[in-house]
Amino acid sequence: MGLFGGTINSLENSLDYSSAKNRIISSNIANIDTPNYQSKEVNFKNVLNSAMTSTFDAKKTNPKHLSFSNESSNTSYQIRDSKDTMYNHNGNNVDVDKEMAELAKNQIYYQGLVDRLAGKFSSLQTVIRGGR
């Protein structure tokens, strides 16, 4: 188990996912009038599981040294074209109502993650200050 039990790393991966989802939704909305544009979506693939299981052993010169989490650049989500929707007359399949609903849902999710991360750092700050 790491210093923080993997919580901060899991929150970081979740924030990466939420940011990617926000970029994709924004791209979809920006391309609403682009002919033959295929809307894209972000698939969430085991972010928490990969964050908890991806560790490597660093060279330890003292048995009290902590293990490090693997901070590889592999993402735990994938971006793919959405082909399961109806097409507009110009071949575009972006539904602005669906995208706006997804954007609102993603903003709530992101804010919850940020609040949880701020709480973690606040708890650490309290511990460092000796409970004050």
Image: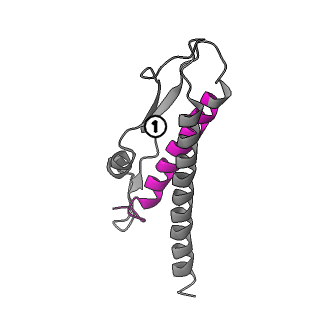
In this view, 118 is above or below 83: below
Q: How was this image coloured?
A: one colour
Report x, y in % for residue 10: 43, 53
Q: Residues within 10 Å of mark 1 (few under 14, many from 20)?
A: few
Q: Is residue 3 above or below residue 85?
A: below
Q: Is residue 64 magenta?
A: no
Q: Front-most of 128 and 9? A: 9
Q: Nearer the viewer, residue 92 or 25?
A: 92
Q: Quadrant of the C terminus?
A: bottom right
Q: Most extreme residue toward the front, as rendered?
A: 89
Q: Residue at x 59, y 32 (%)?
A: 96
Magenta-highlighted residues: 1-28
114 or 124: nearer the viewer: 114
Helix, strand or loop status at disc 1? loop
Point out residue 131 in the picture as x, y percentages from the top left corner. 53, 87
Task: Return the residue at label 1.
Answer: 75
Main secondary-structure element of the magenta-colored stretch: helix
Which residue type does callout 1 highlight? Thr
Quarter of image, res 30: top right
The location of residue 94, given as percent across then percent down, is 56, 25
**Rendered-image quadrant of the N terminus:** bottom left
111 w.r.t. 28: above or below? below
Q: How many marks?
A: 1
Q: Is residue 68 above or below residue 97?
A: below
Where's residue 112, x and y in %?
52, 59
Query: Which residue: 63% across, 34% down?
Result: 26
Front-most of residues 57 and 43: 43
Residue plotted at (42% across, 65% down): 4
Q: Is residue 7 magenta?
A: yes
